[in-house]
Structures are given as C-alpha cells and as structure tokens.
Image (cartoon, rainbow, N blue to C red):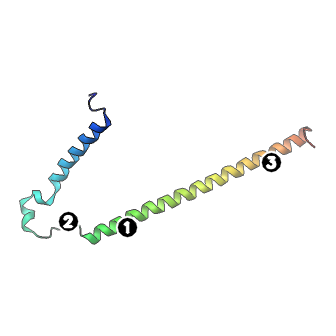
Amino acid sequence: MSEISNPRKSLLLISLISLQFLSGFSADSNSENKTKPHSSSRMSGSTILVLCIAVATVVGLSFFLFRLWQKKKREEQYARLLKLFEEDDELEVELGLRD
C-alpha cells in the first residue's frame, strides 16, 4: 500500500485505468459502429464549440461574481473597521481621556 502513496504512481495508475475505460467506450471498438459512417453518439464540431463557449461563459461569470463578492465583503469589513474606530474616539471623549 505504501507504493501507491507516491503521487506520481497514483496519477499514473488513475490515468491508465481511465484510458482503459475510454478505449472501451470508443466508437471503433464495436463492429456495428464501423458500418455506419456517422454515428448519432458522436458530437459534431459545432456542438463541441458551443459546449466550450458555454463552459467558458460559466467560468467567466463565476469569476466575475466571485470578484464582486470579494469587493463587497472588503467594503463591509472596511466600513466595520471605520465604525469601530469612530466608537473608540467617542468612548475616549466620554471617559475624559481625550478632549
């Protein structure tokens, strides 16, 4: 079991297993798919392009929303910090520590 703990060996093992699964799912492995020139299970180039654009759009939108959330959170923390210091000034005046 200690042999598999090496990250490179485990990555190699996972990639070899996934290649075995991919080769089993390929269209060339079945003899019935060889007779059909265009199988319905294959995606066209335009479908792949649309999927790539959709994934890129989702990733871009997620990144934008994350940055917007970070900016809002930063502004809230800054406002809380300013409020904290304002309250300290009032407290010092009330205690007579400052004029």
Q: Nearer the viewer, mark 3 or mark 1?
A: 1
Q: Secondary structure at mark 1?
A: helix
Q: Looking at the image, which residue sits at the far bottom?
A: 46
Q: Nearer the viewer, mark 2 or mark 1?
A: 1
Are discs 2 and 1 less than 8 Å apart at CB? no
What residue did someone put label 3 on?
86
Q: Earlier in the sequence, mark 3 or mark 2?
A: 2
Q: In which quarter of the view is residue 94 placed?
A: top right
Taking 59 as reference, is 12 above or below it?
A: above
Numbered tag placed on residue 42 in the rendering: 2
Q: Secondary structure at mark 3?
A: helix
Taking 92 as reference, is 66 above or below it?
A: below
What residue did someone put label 1 on?
53
Q: Amino acid at mark 2?
A: Arg
Q: Amino acid at mark 3?
A: Glu
| Quarter of the figure that contains the N terminus | top left
- Give the Cα distance between marks 3 and 2: 65 Å
Taking 12 as reference, is 27 above or below it?
A: below
Q: In which quarter of the view is residue 39 placed?
A: bottom left
At 80% from the left and 45% from the top, the residue drawn is 87
Q: Earlier in the sequence, mark 2 or mark 1?
A: 2
At 15% from the left and 52% from the top, the residue drawn is 24
At 89% from the left and 42% from the top, the residue drawn is 93
Q: Nearer the viewer, residue 95 or 6?
A: 6
Taking 2 as reference, is 7 above or below it?
A: below
Q: Residues within 10 Å of mark 2 (few under 14, many from 20)?
A: few
- Residue 87 is left or right of residue 2, and the answer is right
